[in-house]
């Protein structure tokens, strides 16, 4: 099983707007690709960063689905995200494999 985690650090001033964008645009868009088994958005409670930190997690049992998402869907999604919240967020991703 593969876990794709994207960590976002959001400026306090756009937190509500960003959450709305995620729930109304990004999450439904990713769900409609049918490439992931599950998705969840988590708020980091003990983040050392300035701003609000979230983790967006997607799981799949097929690494090919992840690669398809990265190549076909992610560039457009994250270009739109960066444009909508220019200079108000940073994000990075991590790809992990379940051990158990």
Image: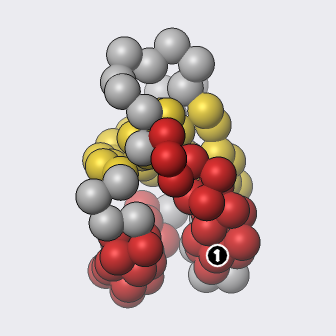
Where is residue 11 drawn, in percent x and y?
42, 44
Where is residue 28 drawn, in percent x and y?
70, 74
Number of numbered labels in the structure image: 1
Q: Quadrant of residue 77?
A: bottom left
Return the residue nearer the eye: 54 or 33. Answer: 54
Q: In the rendered image, which quarter contains the C terminus?
A: top right
Is residue 91 placed above or below 51 in the rendered structure? below
Residue 55 falls left or right of residue 33: left
Q: Is residue 25 visible?
A: yes
Return the residue nearer the eye: 87 or 41. Answer: 87
Residue named by callout 1: 25
Q: Is residue 95 visible?
A: no
Residue 79 falls left or right of residue 14: left
Q: Residue at x 35, y 76 (%)?
A: 83
Q: Residue at x 72, y 72 (%)?
A: 24
Badge 1: few (under 14), some or many (20 or more) residues near its Cα, within 10 Å? few
Residue 41 falls left or right of residue 87: right
Residue 100 falls left or right of residue 63: right
Label 1, secondary structure: give it.
Answer: helix
Is residue 42 placed above or below 87 in the rendered structure? above
Q: By what rule are the colours in the image chosen?
A: secondary structure
Q: Residue at x 38, y 84 (%)?
A: 76
Is residue 55 placed above or below 32 in the rendered structure? above
Where is residue 22 drawn, in percent x and y?
62, 63
Q: Residue at x 27, y 58 (%)?
A: 87
Is residue 31 placed above or below 11 in the rendered structure? below
Return the residue nearer the eye: 98 or 46. Answer: 46
């Amino acid at each position: 099983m593969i876990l794709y985690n994207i960590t976002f650090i959001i400026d306090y001033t756009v937190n509500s707007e960003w959450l709305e964008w995620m729930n109304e645009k990004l999450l439904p868009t990713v769900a409609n690709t049918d490439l992931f088994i599950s998705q969840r958005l988590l708020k980091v409670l003990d983040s050392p960063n300035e701003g609000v930190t979230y983790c967006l997690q997607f799981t799949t049992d097929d690494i090919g689905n992840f690669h398809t998402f990265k190549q076909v869907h992610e560039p457009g999604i994250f270009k739109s995200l960066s444009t909508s919240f220019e200079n108000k967020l940073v994000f990075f991703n991590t790809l992990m494999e379940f051990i158990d």
